[in-house]
Image (cartoon, rainbow, N blue to C red):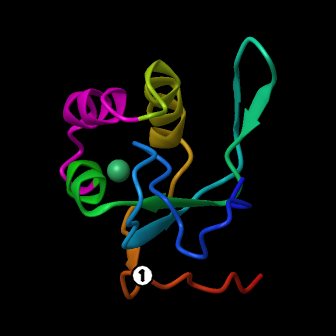
Amino acid sequence: MHNNPSPVPACDFCGRQGAIAFYDTTEFFVPTKAYDWASGNRFYACPTCRTLVDALDRNGLATYAELGPHGIHGIQVITAFRDHHTPGATTFTPGTHPEHHR
Ligand SMILES: [Zn+2]
């Protein structure tokens, strides 16, 4: 899911560029009309979405994500994310892509 040409991850909640943190997740799937979307085991977040996640503001997060390119799909992802993530974001330097050590 992170195979776009940019080396910098986009936000997995709202789809906007400029992720600054990530959450570890247990992989889950969100069925769409075309395919089952796979979460992977890491969720990137932009500054706004990270603040909303840490505040447990699901409605605020859904509203913000709905305004982004993921649209309604983002709300399904947020709902599933709530039950599958390890609380507490790991931050990294904006404009870089953190390596995945597993
Ligand atoms: Zn975001």
Q: Examine the image and state in which quarter residue 80 appears.
A: top right
Q: Residue at x 34, y 26 (%)?
A: 66
Q: Residue at x 20, y 57 (%)?
A: 51
Q: Nearer the viewer, residue 84 or 1?
A: 1
Residue lying furthest front: 5
Q: Residue at x 53, y 24 (%)?
A: 73
Q: Main secondary structure of the magenta part?
A: helix
Q: Secondary structure at mark 1?
A: loop
Question: Is the residue 84 above or below the residue 22 in the image?
Answer: above
Mark 1 residue crowding within 10 angstroms, few (<14) / some (14–19) / many (20+): few
Left or right for 31, reference 6:
right
Read off the magenta span.
54-68
Residue 93 image point, x, y percent: 38, 88
Please state, as top left, top right, bottom left or bottom right, where the C terminus lies in the image.
bottom right
Q: Examine the image and state in which quarter residue 60 appears.
A: top left
Q: Which residue is mark 1?
A: 95
Residue 36 image point, x, y percent: 79, 27
Q: Given the image, on which type of amino acid does mark 1 rest? A: Gly
Residue lying furthest top: 33
Question: Is the residue 21 above or below the residue 50 in the image?
Answer: below
Q: Examine the image and state in which quarter residue 54 appears.
A: bottom left
Q: Nearer the viewer, residue 100 or 17?
A: 17
Residue 92 image point, x, y percent: 41, 85
Left or right for 94, reference 69:
left
Left or right for 25, reference 18:
right
